Image (cartoon, grey):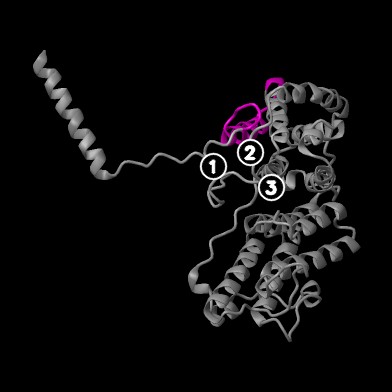
Amino acid sequence: MDYEDEKEQEPQLTSRCGYEVRDVVRAFLQSLNEAGVVASGKLLHYTADMISSGGLLLFERLCYDYAFDHIGIASPRIFFYLATTFKELRALAAKHELGVFCTLPNVQQSTTEIALILQGCPKKTKPKYPTIPPETHDNEDWLRSVLRTTDKAAVRKVYQRATDMEPMLHAANEMVFSIVEGGTENALFWAKWLHEEDHHVRKKYRSGLSTAERGPVALKSQQQKTAMGYYLVNVLAELYKEFSQKGMVRLHQEFQALLDLFRATDGRSTQRRKQDIIALLIQVLIDMPRMKVPAAPALVHDSATLQRMIQQAPTFYREVQYHPMPTKLLPSSVTGVKKKKAKEPTKEDKLQQQLAMMDQMAMSFYRM
């Protein structure tokens, strides 16, 4: 997971236990990927340190990013769980000062439970969007030549001829057709193609493919309200209703939680996360109808063990709270978490290294 595209963060910002903030994030994410008692202990320590240092929003961001990057379709229930639990935690944080908030038993237990459930969830990496050839954009001949299907009911309920241009109709029809056929890569292709086509048109004509304001009212600009993502999620929502009426899927809460997260206006849904949400919605509509039980599996399989571990939460929080409160609270995002790879040597550098080695060998020979 990389946060290089975020704002620069102060290098010396530390947590309550004195860890540099990037080190806390790296250790937390590493512990999530490990198993065993030691890994769980580290995970709870860094969770308590983060929350006690005012990092609830950072903790929430990391949990959501980890869920999208490493869990996804393997356990869709996690997104409904995170949405409901973090809503309660944010409400408590608004009512209490940090010194009181991090001592509340339900806060300590909820944050501990979140971390442990994320650690124990089955893992599956998110799908990658295919690369879109540049020549496919602003090319009506190409678009006409690749169309394979007729109009779909889910698209017709969203598409508005008075405000939406035809590429939106065709691309959405192809996306729905690919979903019904089980073609994840093709469905992702058309979702990304439509996004890029809209961006291309906006850049060229200062107006996108649609003037319909499908985004939330709380959004400030018309450009935000007419973003193509809202059209796509509306189509996917209509397709889910169609599948649900046929008994093909039973993930009402999970699907709605993802839609609500996409439409959130409080800054939690970055453009990267919105792309992840669309990809996951497509996966749900493709993979779940093909399962024997088209519903999300349970989050917890051994509740007794989980409860015993949650009971240890006060111990980890007390250890952290022995330290004084940091001068600055942790931010909602952190840059530079992923270490940069070392640059590969150029051909000239490799040649110089080989010549130096040959000179060294020759000198060693003469010394003999």
Q: Are marks 2 and 1 in contact (CB under 8 Å)?
A: yes
Residue bearing the label numbered 3: 68
Closer to the camera in the image, 313 or 345: 313
Where does residue 221 sit, x and y in percent of width and height?
68, 72
Left or right: 277 with respect to 242?
left
| Res 97 visible | yes
* 21 within the magenta span: yes
Where does residue 73 sit, x and y in percent of width and height?
73, 48
Amino acid identity at mark 1: Glu
Q: Earlier in the sequence, mark 2 or mark 3?
A: 3
Q: CA distance from mark 2 to mark 1?
A: 11 Å
Residue bearing the label numbered 1: 10
Closer to the camera in the image, 325 or 351: 325
Q: Is residue 212 above or below residue 82?
A: below
Q: Earlier in the sequence, mark 1 or mark 3?
A: 1
- The mark lying in front, picked from 1 and 3, is 1
Q: Which residues are magenta?
A: 15-38
Q: Residues within 10 Å of mark 3 (few under 14, many from 20)?
A: many
Q: Residues within 10 Å of mark 2 (few under 14, many from 20)?
A: few
Q: Residue at x 59, y 29 (%)?
A: 19
Amino acid identity at mark 3: Phe
Where does residue 317 sit, x and y in percent of width and height?
76, 26
Q: Residue at x 63, y 32 (%)?
A: 15
Q: Secondary structure at mark 3?
A: helix
**Residue found at the far front of this picture:** 327
Left or right: 292 with respect to 38?
right
| Res 250 visible | no
Q: Residues within 10 Å of mark 1 (few under 14, many from 20)?
A: few
